[in-house]
Image (spheres, rainbow, N blue to C red):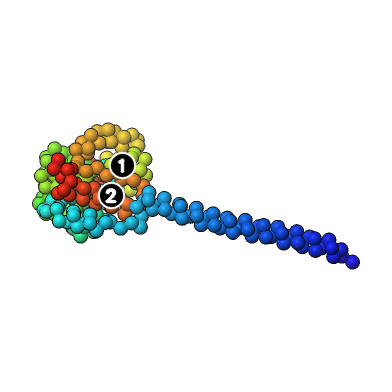
Amino acid sequence: MPDLHGSCKCLFAGKGVLLVRQQKLKLCALFSKRLEVAVTKTFYAETGMGKNTPPGDVKLVRENIAHKSIVLVGLMGAGKTTIGRRVAQKLNLDFVDADHEIERAADMSVAEIFEKHGEKAFRDGERRVIARLLENGPQVLATGGGAYMDEQTRKAIGQNGICIWLDCKHSLLMKRVRRRSTRPLLQTADPDQTMRDLMDERYPVYAKADIRVESRDVPHNAIVNDVIAALAGFLDPNSTKAEQ
Ligand code: S3P
């Protein structure tokens, strides 16, 4: 015959444990909900994801851009084409990629031009194509990483464009360029070091751009918003920056 009293005691004890467990679960659920909200808020604040570009910024840029091109410069992997295309979409402007235009004009890929004709021929073509493209503003123009190193091209951009340097850390550049092996300058024994050398050589020159925006490892939308906000600040007729 089972011990009823004992069984009840067990049952109640078990229920008690269950109740405590339920309370704990409720508390956990509450805590994790709060944690989730906090994490989501931080994520949105950090990444800018889900945030729309302020329409005021878009309007200001469109009203003050005149015939100028928005020219993106920076190292390979900085995101010039990806960001440029999206900036153009938001501003309802045409987008053009200088490398793509060079390839079209030569009917060859950049790698083939380097291989068959050498870097000097590529740079000459690059200078000519960018000069021609700059006549078509307003638009967004993404340039190849070496274009802004050319003094004549820098001058042409200065006269016909607003130059934005997409500044980017070495680790992120490498993470991105590793995805494609089509860049002739990185076909070296030590691409990591090559990229560092290019940074040393080029960053002081890229720093001459009108605007610097950091290209971070966050959703593109965040960088696009940063670019448009920086442009709005630069073009704002009431801002002191615009007079510089
Ligand atoms: C170059 C960058 C490339 C391309 C060419 C040379 C450079 O363009 O123009 O391979 O000198 O940095 P991306 O910056 O678009 O990769």
Which residue is at a point 50% across and 53% down the rendered structure image?
Answer: 35
- Residue 226 is labelled as 2
Does the Cβ of the disc 2 residue fall within 8 Å of ligand 1?
no
What is the x, y in percent for residue 91?
21, 57
Mark 2: secondary structure:
helix
The span from disc 2 to disc 1 (Cα, nearest Å) is: 14 Å
Can residue 112 be seen here? The reply is no
Q: Is mark 1 within 8 Å of ligand 1?
A: no
Q: Position of residue 183 (x, y in %)?
A: 28, 44
Q: Is residue 29 visible?
A: yes
Q: Quadrant of residue 14?
A: bottom right
Q: Quadrant of residue 165?
A: top left
90 left or right of 31 in image: left
For the N terminus, which image quadrant?
A: bottom right
- Position of residue 4 relative to residue 149, above or below, is below
Residue for point 11% across, 47% down: 160
Q: Nearer the viewer, mark 2 or mark 1?
A: 2
For the residue labelled by badge 1, is the local secondary structure a helix, a strand or a loop?
loop
**Identity of the residue drawn at 22% across and 37% down:** 207
What's under tag 2, amino acid-wise?
Answer: Asp
Tag of residue 202: none
Instruction: State the image coordinates of residue 194 (x, y, percent, origin top left).
Output: 31, 35
Instruction: Rate crowding at label 2 as few (under 14), some (14 to 19) or many (20 or more) other CA atoms within 10 Å.
Output: some
The disc, 2 or 1, on the residue closer to the chain's N-terminal end is 1
Residue 168, label in figure: 1
